[in-house]
Amino acid sequence: MSTRALSQYRVTSGRRGQDGVVLILAVFAVVLLTVLAVGIAAVVRVELRASRSSLDRMQALFLAEAGKNQARAVLLYDNPGVDTLIDEWGPKAEEPLDLPHELGDGFYRVRVYDACGRIDINEADYDTLVRLTGDPAAAASILDWRDDGEGVTPDGAEKEYYAGLPWPYVPRNAPFETPGELLLVRGVTPQMFFGSKERPGLVDLITVDSESSNTDANGEPRIYLNEFSSWEHPGFRDFVTGKIGSLFVMYDPTSILDGLSNLTKDGHPGYTSLAQLWSAAQLDFGTIARIIDYLTVDNSLVQRGKANLNTAPLEVIALLPGSSEALAEAIIVRREAQPFRSLGDVVTMLLDLPDGPALFEQMIDHVTTKSSTFVIESMGRTRTGHTHRTLSALVRRTPDAVYVIRQVERDQPLPPLDEEAQQSVAIARR
């Protein structure tokens, strides 16, 4: 081969080699760009899904807020003189709140529970706690947890137990803030708290805040029994007779005054129980039934820890002092026929039962027919998403507003409607 031909061959071969390298680089670049594009697309999809999920959660939360505010409005305009399960907020209303309410691109469901339909764990005494838990040791531990050094167990021994746990903590020694706090208490087991098929859990029976207004069925403040020492004062006498008409003209308050005098002579601060209208004032039960809803032994605006006989479930009524499952069943039959409108209705019902006077003495100071605190559970969900947001709010009702005391958010949906509620929904949709 000539020198010229050899040079030409070398040039051609070099170009082919360069072309091969360029081709490899080009293929590598295409592969790299493809990988980058796929990676970026995946990241974008993830970001889009995350953004969509975040948007769904936010929209679901706003829907839940709408449901909560609707429930607050219903409670505000509800009759505060008496609260029953057939009220507009109740599960047995003609059109229950727990219907899917469409709003924008989603819907919400909302439920309202009467906090006075449960046992107030911050107010219950030892005997009630024993009946509630079925365990005297757990009942004592609950008292120790909520009392500042005044419980059953010495404060040092109590703190020593909690300090010796694998993950130690300090007992609150103050009122419970949430029902779930019970799981921190010595002797309260998850099974006791959440319940089983045979026994309802504490979570379904308790509250940490229950208040009812200290007013009569007309919404007027009750008369403080210990103020009857001023009966001879014309201003007080005119106030009482003007407030409740002819009741204290028909029923001479001399017996109330004598009872008050006898109580103070025996070293008592005065009337401390409505049952003393019978035991101390020695009024007959017909008179007591007529006047009891207008009277109080607690000179405060609200009363704590009283169970609403119109809304409490059978298990809660059976836990009240002097009560039983049979009595609870009788009370539920009575309220389904006609809700209790006042404490006078409660007295009349109790006195129609065997051992009526004893039941009256044991129960009357622990019951009410109205409530000021409620639990609102509201769930929101978007139409296209799969995200639920549920708000659980403890609210207090006053004459002017229904305001939130405490609120928590969670992702779980509300439980499905039970059979009775589904029937109510079907009737409401007809």
Image: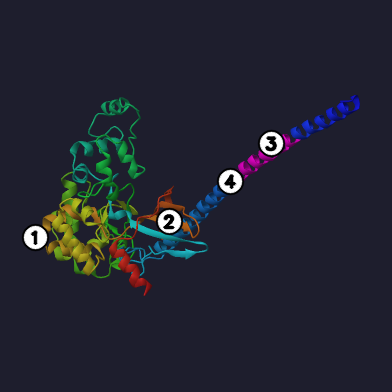
Where residue 403 sits in the image (x, y, percent)? Answer: 44, 54
Front of the two marks 4 and 2: 4
Q: CA distance from mark 4 to mark 2?
A: 26 Å
Please name the residue that numbered disc 3 is placed on: 28
Label 2 crowd (10 A; few <14 / some 14-19 / many >=20): many
Amino acid bearing label 3: Phe
Q: Secondary structure at mark 2?
A: strand
Label 3 crowd (10 A; few <14 / some 14-19 / many >=20): few
Front of the two marks 3 and 4: 3
- Name above or below for residue 85 compared with residue 142: below
> Can residue 171 be seen here?
yes
Task: Using residue 110 as the reference point, say whether residue 346 is left or right of it.
Answer: left
Q: Which mark is residue 354?
A: 1
Amino acid bearing label 1: Pro
Q: Which mark is residue 47?
A: 4
Image quarter for residue 266? top left
Residue found at the very far right of the displayed protein:
4
- Name above or below for residue 290 compared with residue 207: below
Front of the two marks 3 and 1: 3
Q: CA distance from mark 3 to mark 1?
A: 95 Å
Amino acid bearing label 4: Glu
Q: Secondary structure at mark 4?
A: helix
Image quarter for residue 287? bottom left
Q: Which mark is residue 379?
A: 2
